């Protein structure tokens, strides 16, 4: 939806500047394009170029203060930019940088770190990753084991991080590590900036069930970090992580890759015609059971779209509390899982086996691969909804007040340390 | 309801809620049920006086809405009625008032609408037969012509409020297509067969038509050309039912949340156990979906959006399935007390289960969605 009619003179001038600059310079958007594989180096090179075009045109970091290379404008200008950018393919490989690292730095970073990293980020020079989850646990983030010790004027990191999107293409990572194991777990953490090409960093891509490998695992062996590369306070990592996680949730609700934004949605229900085509191909168009399954698939898709729209609108207007965002998130997961069940039941064996040379049996593999683990498991979503949205009692915790080094950990983790 | 209500709509919601809490709280249904009655005519008349039916009736006939303008407001009322499992004939009367205001003759409008708006008259709609597709498509009644008259035969199934109605809106099929008629309930040849119900605040009946002869003046709209009008009525009926279900579930979940926060076992409130709180998280999520879908459907009808028909079946899929599932689990979370007559929750579950089955089951609406999508 174009809101040009609401523009002030200043906003109008910005809009025209953006329109003129992007025309002919930015690559066009392809609505059919699949979500980006962060394992694709060519894609990353293209996105770096696009981001540089935006920077050169004064369109990078619209709400970022001018002191750090941004435009220092308010949110309205960002919306105008996005409206004008509708025909173009915006870069999407900088999701971590813009959605998470930038707000972390703005809220907690020293002047030195802000001037060192933010302008380069806006020029598209650096790819960032976040180094939070560890092999020993993901949901219990603050139980992480990676250690950072002070040696002279350096911090030295040892440990391992995992589920890092595009880790092998990243220049820098924002890394949460344990700096004091003798205090309770939330109190002994510090957030660092790590040079991913520093000596001692080993990055291994992880092969997933479906073969893709844009996630990585990193090993840190005596990796040295300059003393001034701490974001926030030493042992104040939990506070930085709160900003970090809140920004992550907001960004996931809004759509992680701004470049992937679909055009302003028609405000009507969209029926997936592929369901109908599948029924016709299998000769099931008159079969009552098949029709009931397809009808439910149509219904759950529509309900999900309506719920997301409602929650977004309600949070913006204040009619719904901000915690409602988790409802969309949980419904996304539940809907995806239910959809795979309906489609598997519809197609039967054709979903799990195809002749060689055909595409992989997509419906069956969707059933294998559709889960909600990344970005907070459904169990964590349910905890957030029940504890924060419904105000039910919190889980009793055995680890909140004990020093971290007196807690029980995975037996494998214990054996290593 | 919608998250973007106007000030007037919020006022309507608050007035309705206050009236119902004072005049017809959930306890009113229990008192009626204990007396083996299902509704209180005096309370219904007061509710009608608040303008509930007038939402479908233009000003010249005592109401205050033209066309579809009252649908969202009526859904707001229906949701409030759900919160107290209201027992009056709102659904039936509103749907017939909508039909007559849309398609009735001037004489029919003048004769019936003011009395429906004031609560003095009650009307019911004979749409479907008694089969599994009852409530989602016309059937059961056939009409033929005899001279200038029309003759109706067959059985209309699960007709809401037929047993207390003075007027029947009748949808019947002939070779030419669908026709609708407005007739007095005591027309010769019409027999009301009241049913025994799960829902204690509602009345359903099969209505038998045996050689029922009626004149052309009873036609609502043109003979054989009522299909589009019937579809619109069906949309209104289903949308109001979905809004009511949302109210039922919303209230049941509210008092269940209160209960699990107060009830202690093993030294903790039972609402602190993930076995319960994860289910409650799923329930509030699906309820948000039901609210979104019910609000979308009412607005789509009111705006005459091209996707109104689909929206209505999407809403029924969500509200029908999860309405029952959520309230059933709420009863379960109450433990033993939930299984007693003394606790209110069974009234909510009775209404949710009935609403799932009436006006088309979710499965029937899933089939309808395929048809609407062109399969």
Image: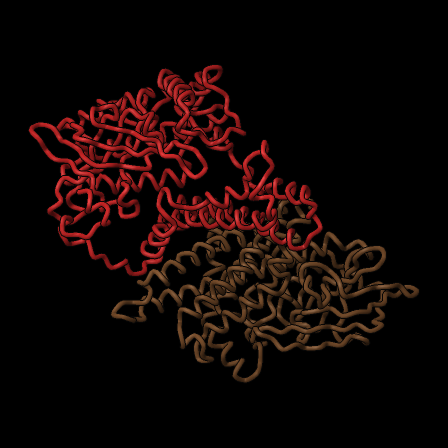
Tell me the shade of chain B: brown
Q: Position of residue B25 (x, y in %)?
A: 47, 73
Given the current orientation, which residue lies at the most extreme bottom position?
B35
Q: How is the image coloured?
A: by chain
* Residue nearest the viewer, comparing A127 with A409: A409
Q: Is residue B156 above or below residue B295?
A: below
In the image, taking residue A261 as reference, residue A241 lies left or right, namely left
Asked if one can make out residue B302 in the rendered structure from this viewpoint, the answer is no
Marker count (numbered): 0
Q: Position of residue B44 (x, y in %)?
A: 57, 72
Residue at coordinates 63% horizontally, 52% vertically from top-left? B68
In the image, taking residue A356 as reference, residue A26 lies left or right, namely left
Residue B160: quadrant of the picture? bottom right
Residue at coordinates 27% horizontally, 38% vertically from top-left? A132
In the image, taking residue A360 as reference, residue B139 lies left or right, namely right
Q: Is residue B118 above or below residue A334?
A: below
Given the current orientation, which residue lies at the most extreme right position?
B147
For the C terminus of chain A, the quadrant is top left
In the image, taking residue B302 as reference, residue A19 lies left or right, namely left
Residue at coordinates 27% horizontally, 24% vertically from top-left? A118
Residue A256: quadrant of the picture? top left
Which chain shows up in red? A
Given the current orientation, which residue lies at the most extreme left position?
A152
Asked if one can make out residue B13 in the rendered structure from this viewpoint, the answer is yes
Q: Position of residue B337 (x, y in %)?
A: 40, 77
Q: Position of residue B260 (x, y in %)?
A: 35, 67
* Residue nearest the viewer, comparing B316 with A191: A191
């Amino acid at each position: 939806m174009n809101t040009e009619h609401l523009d002030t003179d200043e906003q109008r001038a910005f809009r025209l500047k953006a329109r003129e600059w992007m025309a002919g310079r930015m690559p066009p958007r392809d609505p059919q394009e699949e979500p980006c594989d962060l394992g694709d180096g060519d894609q990353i090179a293209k996105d770096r170029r696009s981001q540089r075009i935006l920077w050169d045109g004064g369109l990078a970091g619209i709400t970022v203060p001018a002191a750090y290379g941004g435009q220092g404008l308010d949110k309205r200008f960002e919306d105008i930019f996005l409206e004008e950018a509708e025909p173009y393919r915006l870069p999407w490989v900088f999701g971590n940088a813009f959605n998470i690292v930038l707000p972390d730095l703005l809220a907690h970073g020293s002047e030195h770190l802000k001037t060192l990293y933010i302008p380069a980020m806006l020029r598209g020079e650096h790819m960032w990753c976040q180094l939070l989850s560890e092999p020993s646990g993901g949901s219990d983030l603050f139980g992480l084991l990676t250690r950072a010790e002070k040696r002279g004027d350096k911090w030295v990191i040892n440990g391992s991080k995992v589920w890092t999107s595009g880790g092998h293409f990243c220049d820098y990572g924002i890394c949460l590590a344990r700096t004091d194991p003798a205090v309770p777990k939330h109190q002994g953490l510090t957030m660092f900036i790590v040079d991913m090409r520093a000596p001692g960093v080993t990055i291994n891509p992880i092969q997933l069930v479906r073969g893709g490998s844009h996630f990585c695992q990193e090993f840190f062996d005596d990796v040295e970090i300059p003393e001034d590369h701490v974001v926030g306070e030493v042992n104040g990592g939990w506070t930085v992580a709160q900003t970090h996680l809140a920004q992550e949730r907001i960004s996931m609700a809004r759509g992680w890759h701004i470049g992937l934004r679909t055009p302003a949605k028609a405000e009507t229900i969209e029926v997936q015609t592929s369901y109908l085509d599948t029924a016709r191909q299998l000769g099931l168009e008159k079969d009552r059971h098949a029709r009931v399954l397809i009808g439910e698939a149509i219904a759950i898709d529509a309900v999900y779209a309506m719920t997301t729209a409602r929650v977004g609108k309600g949070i913006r207007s204040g009619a719904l509390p901000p915690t409602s965002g988790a409802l969309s998130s949980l419904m996304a997961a539940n809907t995806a899982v239910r959809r795979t069940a309906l489609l598997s039941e519809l197609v039967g064996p054709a979903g799990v086996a195809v002749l060689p040379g055909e595409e992989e049996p997509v419906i069956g593999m969707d059933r294998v691969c559709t889960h909600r683990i990344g970005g907070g498991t459904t169990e964590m979503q349910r905890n957030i909804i029940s504890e924060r949205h419904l105000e039910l009692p919190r889980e009793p915790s055995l680890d909140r007040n004990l020093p971290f080094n007196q807690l029980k950990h995975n037996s494998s983790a214990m054996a290593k340390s | 309801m919608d998250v973007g209500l106007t000030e007037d709509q919020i006022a309507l919601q608050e007035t309705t809620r206050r009236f119902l809490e004072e005049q017809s709280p959930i306890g009113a249904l229990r008192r009626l049920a204990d007396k083996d009655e299902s509704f209180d005519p005096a309370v219904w008349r007061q509710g009608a006086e608040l303008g509930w039916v007038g939402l479908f009736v233009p000003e010249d006939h005592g109401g205050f809405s033209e066309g579809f303008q009252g649908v969202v407001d009526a859904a707001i009322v229906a949701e409030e009625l759900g919160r107290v499992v209201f027992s009056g004939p709102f659904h039936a009367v509103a749907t017939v008032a909508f039909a007559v205001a849309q398609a009735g003759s001037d004489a029919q409008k003048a004769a019936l609408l003011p009395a429906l708006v004031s609560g003095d008259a009650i009307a019911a709609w004979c749409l479907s037969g008694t089969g599994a597709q009852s409530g989602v498509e016309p059937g059961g009644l056939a009409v033929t012509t005899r001279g200038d008259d029309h003759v109706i035969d067959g059985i209309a199934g699960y007709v809401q409020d037929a047993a207390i109605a003075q007027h029947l809106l009748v949808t019947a099929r002939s070779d030419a297509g669908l026709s609708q008629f407005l007739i007095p309930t005591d027309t010769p040849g019409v027999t009301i067969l009241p049913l025994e119900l799960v829902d204690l605040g509602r009345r359903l009946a099969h209505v038998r038509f045996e050689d029922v002869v009626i004149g052309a003046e009873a036609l609502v709209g043109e003979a054989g050309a009522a299909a589009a009008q019937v579809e619109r009525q069906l949309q209104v009926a289903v949308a109001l039912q979905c809004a009511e279900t949302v109210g039922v579930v919303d209230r049941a979940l509210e008092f269940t949340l209160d209960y699990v926060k107060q009830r202690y076992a093993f030294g903790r409130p039972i609402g602190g156990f993930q076995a319960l709180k994860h289910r409650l998280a799923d329930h509030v999520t699906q309820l948000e979906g039901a609210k979104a879908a019910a609000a979308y459907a009412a607005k789509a009808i009111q705006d005459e959006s091209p996707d109104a028909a689909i929206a209505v079946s999407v809403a029924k899929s969500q509200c029908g399935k999860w309405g029952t599932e959520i309230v059933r689990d709420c009863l379960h979370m109450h433990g033993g007390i939930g299984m007693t007559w003394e606790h209110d929750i069974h009234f909510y579950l009775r209404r949710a289960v009935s609403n799932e089955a009436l006006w088309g089951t979710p499965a029937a609406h899933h089939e309808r969605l395929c048809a609407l999508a062109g399969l």
